[in-house]
Amino acid sequence: MQQSIMKGLLLIMLAVIFSAIATVLPRLDFRVSGEPLGFTVVVDAGHGGKDRGASSRGGLFESDINLAIALFLKRELEVRGINVVMTRETSHWLASPHAPNKKRDDMANRKRIIQNANPDVVVSIHMNTFPNPGVRGLQTFYNPKDEKSQKFATAIQNEFNNSELNFYRVPRPGNYYILDQTGFTGVLVECGFLSNAEDERLFSQSAHQRIIAYYIAKAVVRTLVTS
């Protein structure tokens, strides 16, 4: 009799455990879409308009690549239950035509969008350049005063370091407006080097842009869910 009761209790406990696992797994399994997870991410496509950022020898402009990756990232996050707010969704920048300092006005408007969104994290998308054309690969930067910022930067960097993309870097602290002037946790992702011929070739392809967005989204979602 006692064994029967104990067996029944064990089965009930296992059912509760499996039920809990079934609830959590879709949120941890990046491939599964589900109900809204209750998180907001601001995706910031750096530069835009007359501020085209870095450029490649073949004529690729950072502002265009940033926007393409940011739009792919928006889709990757939204299908996995993340509310996404974009700082820009067109080729234009955010500066007022009458602003005396266009760059400052652009950044102030990005800050306003971020603060109005009240996000869990800001992901700012950029491209890099370097005098040595042999340098390539993705690099993340974080606010050294924000532990959560470093956590997101590390998660994104590790996702790429462990991918098939064949490069290895470590996240670095960075003094960037988006990271330290908005009041919210943020990570800046330099997705590649337009000064490198291989990165230039890859980033001219939408398939590669989407791969970059996929891995960033994967790290962001898992970090949000497990934090």
Image (spheres, rainbow, N blue to C red):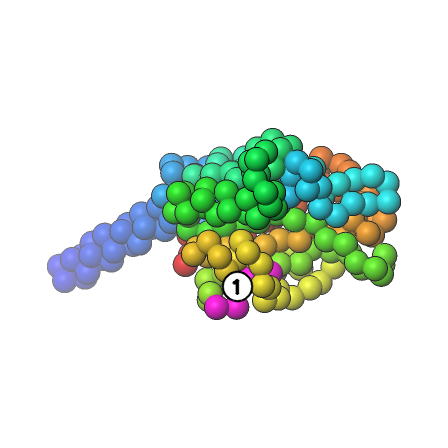
- The answer to whether 35 is drawn above or below residue 223 in the figure is above
Which residue is at the far left? 1
Q: Bounds of the magenta span?
A: 141-145
Judging depth in this view, the residue of 180 and 173 nearest the camera is 180
Residue, x 58% and y 63% (percent of image)? 175
Judging depth in this view, the residue of 49 and 152 nearest the camera is 49
Residue 40 appearing in the image: no
- Quarter of the image for residue 81 reads top left
Magenta highlight on residue 128: no
- The answer to whether 209 is drawn above or below residue 226 in the figure is above
Judging depth in this view, the residue of 44 and 160 nearest the camera is 44
Give the residue at mark 1.
143
Residue 25: percent from left, percent from top: 42, 48
Residue 61: percent from left, percent from top: 75, 41
Name the amino acid, label 1: Asn
Residue, x 14% and y 62% (percent of image)? 2
Q: Would residue 33 appear left or right of 55 to someone viewing this image?
A: left
Residue 27: percent from left, percent from top: 42, 46
Q: Would residue 184 appear left or right of 132 to someone viewing this image?
A: left
Residue 201: percent from left, percent from top: 82, 42
Residue, x 71% and y 63% (percent of image)? 168
Quarter of the picture holding the N terminus: bottom left
**Secondary element at image label 1:** loop
Residue 116 appearing in the image: yes
Judging depth in this view, the residue of 175 and 137 nearest the camera is 175
